[in-house]
C-alpha cells in the first residue's frame, strides 16, 4: 500500500512538473529558425541546350544509373529541371546535363549549379579557370566530380564510380 502511495505521489509531481515546463516560454534561440544564406537567382537558361564545355572522363562511371565509358565528352546543359526538388534548393539550380560524344547522347546526370554569389559558401578547392573544367576523384574513391566554370557560375556533377 505504501509503495502505491509513493508511486502515485511521484506520478502527480512529474505530471505537475510537465505542465509547469510546458507553460514556461522557450528560450530565445530554442524555437527560432536559424538564419539561412540568401539564395541567388538561377542563371538564365533558355529552352535550348547550352554547351558547358568538354571534359575527359578517365574511367568508367555511372550517369543516371547507367554505365558511361571513359572518354572525352561535350557536356551540355538541358532546360530540364531535376525532379523531385531537393528540400531547400532554389528553382533551376538542379538541372540535367547530357554527355555527348560524336553527336550522340551517351548519358545524362543531375548538375548542381552554384551561382557566383554563393561560391564562397561552398568552395574549398581551387576552382577551374574561367571557361575551364576539373575532373577529380573524391575522397574515398566513390565519386568522380566534374567541375565546370562557365559564365562565372560553377556546375558540379557527381558521378558514382
Image (cartoon, rainbow, N blue to C red):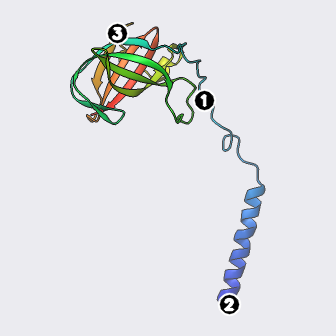
Do callouts 3 and 2 mark residues in contact (Cβ within 8 Å)? no
State whether residue 105 is above or below residue 131. Answer: below
Residue 71: x percent and y percent? Answer: 22, 20
Q: Is residue 104 left or right of residue 46?
A: left
Residue occupying the point 76% across, 53% down: 24
In this view, the residue in front, 138 or 99, is 99
Check contact, mark 2 vs mark 1: CB within 8 A: no
Give whichever of discs 2 and 1 has the lower sequence position: 2
- Residue sitting farthest toward the right: 23
Q: Is residue 124 visible?
A: no
Judging by the rendered image, the residue that carries numbered circle 2 is 2
Residue 18 location, x and y as percent?
72, 63
Query: Which tag is nearer the camera, tag 3 or tag 2?
Result: 3
Observer-side mark, 1 or 3, equals: 3
Q: Quadrant of the N terminus?
A: bottom right
Give above or below for 122 relative to 16.
above
Determine which residue is flagged by label 3: 132
View extreme (front): residue: 104
* CA–CA distance in space, label 1 to label 3: 30 Å
Residues tagged 1 and 3 counted as in contact (Cβ below 8 A): no
Mark number displayed over residue 36? 1
Q: Could you tell me which secondary element the residue under label 3 belongs to? A: loop
Helix or strand or loop: what does disc 1 sit on?
A: loop
Between discs 3 and 2, the one toward the N terminus: 2
Residue visible at 76% across and 63% down? Answer: 19
Amino acid at each position: 500500500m505504501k509503495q502505491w502511495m509513493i508511486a502515485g505521489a511521484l506520478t502527480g509531481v512529474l505530471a505537475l512538473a510537465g505542465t509547469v515546463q510546458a507553460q514556461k516560454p522557450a528560450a530565445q534561440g530554442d524555437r527560432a529558425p536559424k538564419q539561412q544564406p540568401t539564395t541567388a537567382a538561377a542563371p538564365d537558361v533558355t529552352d535550348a541546350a547550352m554547351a558547358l564545355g568538354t571534359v575527359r572522363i578517365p574511367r568508367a562511371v555511372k550517369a543516371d544509373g547507367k554505365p558511361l565509358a571513359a572518354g572525352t565528352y561535350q557536356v551540355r546543359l538541358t532546360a530540364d529541371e531535376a525532379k523531385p526538388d531537393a528540400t531547400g534548393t532554389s528553382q533551376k539550380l538542379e538541372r540535367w546535363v547530357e554527355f555527348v560524344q560524336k553527336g550522340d547522347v551517351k548519358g545524362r546526370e543531375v548538375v548542381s549549379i552554384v551561382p557566383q554569389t554563393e561560391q564562397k559558401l561552398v568552395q574549398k578547392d581551387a576552382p577551374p579557370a574561367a571557361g575551364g573544367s576539373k575532373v577529380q576523384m573524391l575522397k574515398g574513391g566513390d565519386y568522380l566530380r566534374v567541375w565546370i566554370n562557365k559564365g562565372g557560375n560553377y556546375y558540379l556533377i557527381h558521378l558514382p564510380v
